[in-house]
Image (cartoon, rainbow, N blue to C red):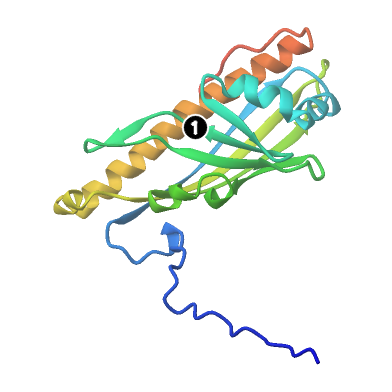
């Protein structure tokens, strides 16, 4: 006779639990910095030609993001190390995961990949929400011409050292917001120029002159 014994379920009440993202933290040291950005780049080609180029992001994204460190993540994702930035003597080297979603009706979206999918330890230091949209608008002109208009909503949560809490709250917030804008301005402006230059070079077209960013 064979008897069946069922092992009792383990008690998980004392098991370590994963900490929530910083965006849901009630730690007073966590600050949120966020902003909205928009700009455009001119492509001297029809919209379908520009779309075919953007669809093949495995080529242009890594070329144009250099010298930032880029590693592939799945079929449409990348892990991007932005470089070292600091404020109040506190430095961080942001690393974010981005997923370039396939286009829908001429609109491309880029969203955040949660850090636990590529480097879980980052969630203890900072949290990033990156939502971008690129829209192709073909212009009526004598020569083929497409404007790529993009918008970005970016929020960053970061746990600052306790000593920074001694500074006025308004100073901490305004300095962080200004630093965020500087980072995005520096990175997005360079990336926009490089994508524009790469597109025209790979299609043997004359590249438009660099224009002043809208932010």
Secondary structure under tag 1 reads strand
Whether 38 is drawn above or below 6: the answer is: above
Q: Where on the picture, by quarter, is residue 201?
A: top right
Q: Is residue 3 left or right of residue 39?
A: right
Which residue occupies 42% across, 32% down? 183
Image x and y of residue 72, in percent: 65, 33
Residue under the image location 62 percent in, 83 percent down: 7
Q: Is residue 176 visible from the viewing direction of this image?
A: yes
- Is residue 202 depicted above or below 214 in this figure? above
Residue at the spot of label 1: 81
Looking at the image, which residue sits at the far right?
48
Q: Position of residue 18 (x, y in %)?
A: 47, 63
Where residue 186 appears, x then y in whole percent? Answer: 45, 26
6 lies left or right of 55: left
Report the front residue among 212 and 121.
121
| Residue at the (73%, 88%) spot, across then down | 4
The one of 53 and 115 positioned closer to us in this rendering: 115
Does residue 81 appear to the left or right of 193 in the view shown?
A: left
Across and down, in percent, residue 10 comes to 54, 79
Q: Quadrant of the N terminus?
A: bottom right
Name the outermost residue toward the left. 166
Q: Residue at x 74, y 39 (%)?
A: 75
Is residue 213 in sight in this rendering?
Answer: no
* Quadrant position of residue 134: top right
**Rendering quarter of residue 191:** top right
Neighbourhood count class around disc 1 (C-alpha, 10 Å): few under 14, some 14–19, many 20 upward: some
């Amino acid at each position: 006779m064979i008897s069946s014994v069922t092992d009792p379920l383990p008690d998980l009440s004392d098991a370590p639990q994963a900490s929530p993202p910083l965006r849901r933290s009630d730690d007073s040291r966590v600050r949120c910095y966020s902003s909205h950005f928009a700009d455009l780049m001119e492509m001297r080609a029809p919209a379908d030609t520009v779309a075919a180029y953007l669809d093949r992001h495995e080529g242009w994204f890594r070329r144009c993001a250099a010298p930032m460190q880029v590693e592939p993540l799945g079929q449409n994702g990348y892990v991007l190390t932005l470089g070292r930035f600091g404020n109040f003597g506190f430095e961080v080297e942001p690393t974010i995961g981005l997923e370039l979603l396939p286009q829908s009706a001429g609109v491309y979206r880029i969203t955040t990949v949660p850090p636990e999918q590529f480097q879980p330890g980052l969630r203890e230091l900072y949290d990033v929400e990156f939502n971008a949209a690129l829209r192709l608008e073909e212009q009526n002109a004598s020569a083929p011409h497409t404007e790529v208009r993009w918008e970005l909503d970016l929020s960053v949560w970061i746990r600052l050292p306790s000593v920074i809490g001694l500074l006025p709250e308004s100073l901490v917030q305004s300095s962080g917001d200004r630093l965020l804008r500087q980072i995005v301005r520096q990175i997005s402006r360079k990336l926009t120029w490089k994508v524009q230059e790469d597109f025209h070079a790979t299609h043997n077209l004359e590249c438009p002159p660099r224009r002043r960013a809208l932010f």
